[in-house]
Image (cartoon, grey):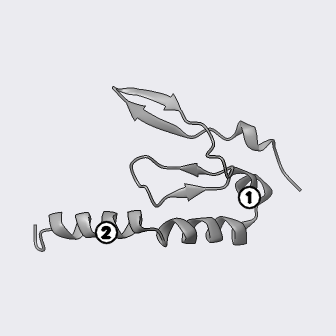
Amino acid sequence: MLLADPSEVRWHALRKGRLVAQELCPDALYRSEVFLDLWLDPEALLAGDLRRLCEVLDRGIATPEHETFVARLGATFQPGS
């Protein structure tokens, strides 16, 4: 049972100092433009479907974009600073 309409969930990106509403991807997910591996299923969120939320997050983490993101973080991380 959904608690609200999935279209009521909004995902925004910061562009030129302004928040801009993002469109759902064709597979009805939101994907972060900054954290490319961060995906959200608004229907699962509103339904309280934690299993589905985790599945979608895991799919994002399994992408090459996530590997690239982690590699960039590792390259800029300075231990002890």
Left of 67 or right of it: where is 1? right
* Left or right of 65 in this view: 52: right
The image shows residue 50 at horizontal and vertical percentages of: 70, 68
Q: Residue at x 64, y 71 (%)?
A: 55
Locate the C terminus by quadrant: bottom left
Which residue was labeled with disc 2? Answer: 70
The image's mark for residue 54 is none
Quarter of image, res 35: bottom left
> Dot 1: few (<14), some (14–19), or many (≥20) neighbours within 10 Å?
some
Q: Residue at x 38, y 30 (%)?
A: 15
Q: What kind of element bears circle 1?
A: helix
Front position in the image: 23 or 50 = 23
Query: To which residue does mark 1 refer?
Result: 44
Q: Is residue 52 left or right of residue 12?
A: right
Mark 1 belongs to which amino acid? Ala
Q: 39 or 5: which is nearer to us?
A: 39
* Residue plotted at (67% across, 41% down): 9
Q: Quadrant of the N terminus?
A: bottom right
Mark 2 and mark 1: Cα distance apart in space: 26 Å
- SS state under label 2: helix
In the displayed orientation, state which residue is furthest to the right: 1
Percent position of residue 60, x then y? 52, 65
**Mark 2 touching mark 1, by CB under 8 A?**
no
Which mark sits nearer the N-terminus, 2 or 1? 1
**Which one is closest to the eye, mark 2 or mark 1?**
2
Residue at 80% from the left image edge and 41% from the top image edge:
5
Q: Residues within 10 Å of mark 2 (few under 14, many from 20)?
A: few
The residue type indicated by label 2 comes to Val
